[in-house]
Structures are given as structure tokens and as C-alpha cells.
Amino acid sequence: MEILIFGGAGFIGSSLTKKLLAKGHSICLICRDMSKAEKNIGKHPNLSFRSIDVLNEAQLKTTIKEYGCIINLIGKLYESKPGEFEKFHYHFVQKLTKVMQN
């Protein structure tokens, strides 16, 4: 199965990605830091990385239509800039839900 994971470079995402790859799935990770993702997960022929503006509905729509499964693991434990928590935990989820419904 073709799986798209938002926030796949972190603790939970990298563990899940490794398990899904071991089961033969093809994974595309949307992440801020591709080098961190590659370091945490390693290289794999069924693993690709993509960088998009997750708050851009047009980019979300174009990206998600290619995948049979979409997993959101984007999370912020603390804000390095004011409003980041709301941006990723509310606005992104709202936009992703809207795009998936259409």
C-alpha cells in the first residue's frame, strides 16, 4: 500500500515507518527535516521524502490524492515561535480534513 505520513521523522513516526516498510509498504514522509528523518529511519528503496507547505490547501490536495492511506503525526511539544502550536494542531488538521472530504 502507498502510505503518506505527515510528521514521520519523530519518535513515533520513525518507529511506525520502519514497521510499515518491513511489511512491504511504500512510504512517503512529509517532514520539516529530511536529514533527521533519514538519520532516524535510514535509507530504504520504498521510502521517499517530500517537503510541502502543509497549510497550503492546493499542495495538500495534490499530494494526498496519490495515496491510499494518510497518517498525521505532526506534533509540537513546545512553541519556538508564537502560534506554532495552534498552526499545526488546529489549522493544519482543519485544512487536511477539508481537503480529504472533497
Image (cartoon, grey):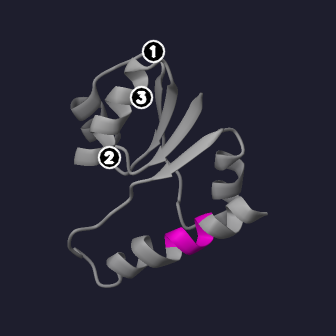
Q: Is residue 10 visible?
A: no
Which quadrant is the N terminus positioned in? top right
Residue 35: percent from the left, percent from the top? 28, 36
Reading the image, the residue beneath label 2 is: 33
Indicate which disc residue 20 carries: 3
Real-space Cα separation, disc 3 to disc 1, in angstroms = 13 Å
Q: Residues within 10 Å of mark 3 (few under 14, many from 20)?
A: some
Q: Residues within 10 Å of mark 2 (few under 14, many from 20)?
A: some
Residue 94 in magenta stretch: yes
- Residue range in magenta is 92-96
Q: Secondary structure at mark 2?
A: loop
Kindly indicate the quadrant of the structure image that contains residue 69.
top right
Residue 64 left/right relative to 46: right
Residue 79: percent from the left, percent from the top? 24, 76
Q: Are marks 3 and 1 in contact (CB under 8 Å)?
A: no
Q: Amino acid at mark 2?
A: Asp
Measured along the vertical axis of the image, is residue 50 above or below residue 95? above
Q: Count all numbered tags in the image, as a single digit.
A: 3
Measured along the vertical axis of the image, is residue 33 above or below residue 100? above
Q: Amino acid at mark 1?
A: Pro
Q: Nearer the viewer, mark 3 or mark 1?
A: 3
Q: Are marks 1 and 2 in contact (CB under 8 Å)?
A: no
Indicate which disc residue 45 carries: 1
Residue at 28% from the left image edge and 29% from the top image edge: 41
Q: Nearer the viewer, mark 1 or mark 2?
A: 1
Real-space Cα separation, disc 1 to disc 2, in angstroms = 19 Å
Residue 71: percent from the left, percent from the top? 49, 49
